[in-house]
Image (cartoon, grey):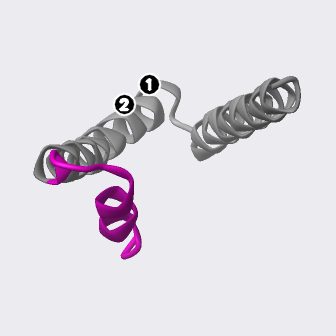
Amino acid sequence: MPGVPALINAQTVGDEGRYQGLVNACSSLGKAVGPVVGGLVIGQFASFSVLFLGCAVVDLLVVGGLGLTRYHYRTSEASH
């Protein structure tokens, strides 16, 4: 995503390079681990449907976690 470096630069002061590096490292780690895990799931279960079901579950967990975080942030901000 091209906007991430600008967002990091705007939100950090003094340690921009460190956080840029962390974001790039996590991105690269995901690109390296994702195909390996996908290959293991397909090889173990011999089914793309299991892989897609697992991805859907992970997506729902992430969206739910983001929703809970947003709800918590809004309620804590309203109480202040």
Q: Neighbour class for label 1 at 10 Å: few (<14), some, many (≥20)?
A: few
Q: Is residue 56 magenta?
A: no
Q: Nearer the viewer, residue 46 or 4?
A: 4
Question: Along the horizontal axis of the image, is 42 left or right of 36?
Answer: right
Q: How far apart are labels 1 and 2 at the CA level?
A: 6 Å
Residue type at mark 1: give it: Gln
The answer to which quarter of the image holds residue 30 is top left
Find disc 2 in the rendering and name its residue. 40
Q: How many marks?
A: 2
Percent x, y of residue 24:
21, 52
Tell me which amino acid carries mark 2: Leu
Q: Name the side, left or right, on which 16 lies relative to 39.
A: left
Q: Nearer the viewer, residue 10 or 69?
A: 10
* Callout 1: SS: helix
| Magenta-drawn stretch contains 14 | yes
* Image vertical order of residue 78 relative to residue 4, above or below: above
Q: Residues within 10 Å of mark 2 (few under 14, many from 20)?
A: few
- Residue closer to the observer: 2 or 55: 2
To which residue does mark 1 refer? 44
Q: Is residue 16 above or below residue 61?
A: below
In what element is the residue under mark 2? helix
Q: Which residues are magenta?
A: 1-16
